[in-house]
Amino acid sequence: FTTYQTTDFMKAEIAAVKAVNPDIPVTTNMMGLYDGLCYPDLAEELDIISWDSYPYWHTPNNNIIEAYRESFTHDYIRGLKKQPFLLMECTPSTVNWRPVSKMKKPGMHRLAVLNAIGHGSESGLYFQIRQSRGSAEKMHSAVISHVGTENTRVFREVSMLGADLEKISDKIYGSDNPAKVAIIYDKESKWALNQSQGPRNCGLDYDNLCAQYYKYFWQNGIGVDVLDSRSDFEDYKIVIAPLLYMFHNDIQQKMRKFVECGGILLSTAFSGVVDENDLCFLGEATQEKLSDVLGMWVEETDALFDEEANETSWNQNTYKLKEICEVIHTTTAEVLAVYGKDYYKGAPVITKNTYGVGTAYHIAANCEDALIEDLCRQLVAEAQITGILGDADIPDGIGICYRENETKRYIFIGNFSDEAKCIDFSKSSGNEERAYVNILDDAKIGGKVCLEPYGIVILEI
C-alpha cells in the first residue's frame, strides 16, 4: 500500500514536470536495499535510476563484506532498468548518524566511487558540497569542511577523483555491464518472509544471504544482474534464487522455461513455500512448487539455534549447515550430498535434476561461505563461464567488475582490504597475449597488478 501511494504521488509530480518539458528525464533518490518501498514499482515510472550510497566502511574485520554487499546493491540498482544509473549521493568521508561514524581512510573514497562506476554508475555526486554549521547534519563531512579552505585531505582526494572521472568519462560513459548470471532479489518475498512466523523468527538475513551467493562472482570478475521475480531470465546462463520464500509474478513458469531451454537454476532452502497471497502451497510434489523442475519435495523444515550446526560432505570437503535444514524427498533428482547429523542424517541436502535440456540444483540448508563458493564454482564450470581475468588466482579482498562498448572492455580491479595485494593473470587462460593499459595513469600492465590498500586500476583491452 505504501509503495502504491508513493508511486502514485511520484507520478503526479512527474506529470507536472513533463507538462513543462516532456523531454526532461526524471529520477528520484533511492536508498539501496531499503525495506520501506518496493523499488521495481517506482522504477517503471522513472527514466533514470539513482541512489544514495552510504556503506559502513572500516568496521573491524568487515570491510570486505561491506564491499561485496555494496557492489551487490549497485548491481541491484542497475538491474531495476538494466541500464546505467546515477550515484546521486555519497559522502567524501564520514557520515554523522552511525553509532561510530568512522572517517574514510586515504584512498577509500576514490575506490568506492570508481567501484560504483565499474558497476554501472555514470556519476559520483555528493552530499554535501559545504559542511553546514548547525542542525542535524553539521558533523556530516563535505567537500568543503568547516575550515573553509582547500587545505584538507578530503578536499585533495575529491579533487584527485574529479580528475580521474574527467579522464575516463569519454571511454566509460554509456558502456554496458554484460551479465550471464542473475541473482533474484525480491522485496515482496522478503516482506512475506519476515512475517512468516517460523521456522526462525530471527537470524534469516535475506539481504546477507543474497550477497553471500553474489560474492564468488564479484571476486572472480563474472558479471551479475540482480533482478526481482517480475523479470525474464532467458538471456542468462545461471539463475540463483536464494531463500525465495514467495512464488509470485508467474515465477514458476519463467523458471521452468529457463531450465527447460538449457539454463542452470540454483534454489535454496525455504523457497517456494507460499503463493502471492502468503498462503502455503499444499501437496507433495506439485508443479506450483516447481517439484517437477527440482525433482524433489520438502516434508518439513528444522530450525537450528545459533549454537547448533549440522554438516555435509561434498567434493571431499566437509561443510557446516546452519539456521534452517529442510528434510526433502527426491523424485527424479540425483543426490549429491546428504546430512551428517541428527534424525535426518543421510537425507538429501544437495540435489541436481535434469529438466528439459537444463539443470536445477537445490541446497536444502543455509550453509557456510565455503560451500556456497564451491557450489557457484561448479555452476560456472558447467555453464562454461569464465571470469574476466580467466583462471587467475584472485586474493581475498579483491573485487573485479567490467564494462564494455562495441570496441573496448574496461576491467575495474579494486583492493578493499587493508593489505597490499597482487594478482598475476599473465599466464591465465586467454590472457597470455593480451596487452593492458591502466587508463587512470596510462601505464602499461604486463599481466600483473599490485595494489596498495584501497587501490584500484581500470584496465583497457
Image (cartoon, grey):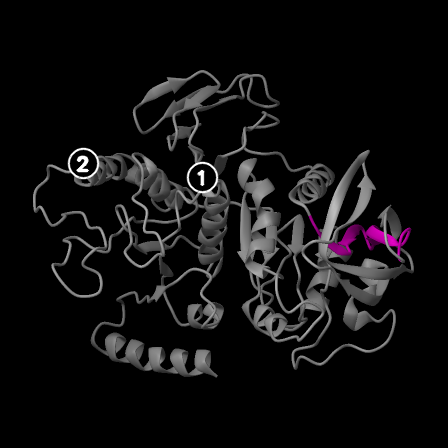
The magenta stretch spans residue 352: yes
Q: Residue at x 60, y 52 (%)?
A: 182
User: From this viewpoint, which residue is outermost toward the left?
Assistant: 148
Residue 243 vertical placement versus 18 (above, below)? above
Left or right of 3 in this view: 302: right
Q: Residues within 10 Å of mark 1 (few under 14, many from 20)?
A: some
Q: Residue at x 24, y 52 (%)?
A: 126
Identify residue type, mark 2.
Arg
What secondary structure is marked by label 1? strand
**Rendering coords of residue 437 (x, y %):** 38, 23
Q: Residues within 10 Å of mark 2 (few under 14, many from 20)?
A: few
Magenta stretch prevailing secondary structure: strand
Q: Quadrant of the C terminus?
A: top left
Which residue matches tag 2? 156
Q: Nearer the viewer, residue 35 or 141?
A: 141
Q: Is residue 429 visible?
A: yes
Residue 299 vertical placement versus 294 (above, below)? below
Q: Nearer the viewer, residue 324 or 228?
A: 324
Which label's residue is closer to the chain start, 1 or 2?
2
Q: Residue at x 45, y 78 (%)?
A: 3
**Rendering coords of residue 349 (x, y %):** 82, 52
Q: Residue at x 89, y 54 (%)?
A: 347
The magenta stretch spans residue 254: no
Quadrant in the picture for residue 47: bottom left
**Rendering coords of residue 306 (x, y %):** 67, 56
Q: Is residue 263 visible?
A: no
Which residue matches tag 1? 404
- The segment highlighted magenta reads 344-367
What secondary structure is marked by label 2? helix
State the separation of the CA atoms marked 1 and 2: 30 Å
Q: Nearer the viewer, mark 1 or mark 2?
A: 2
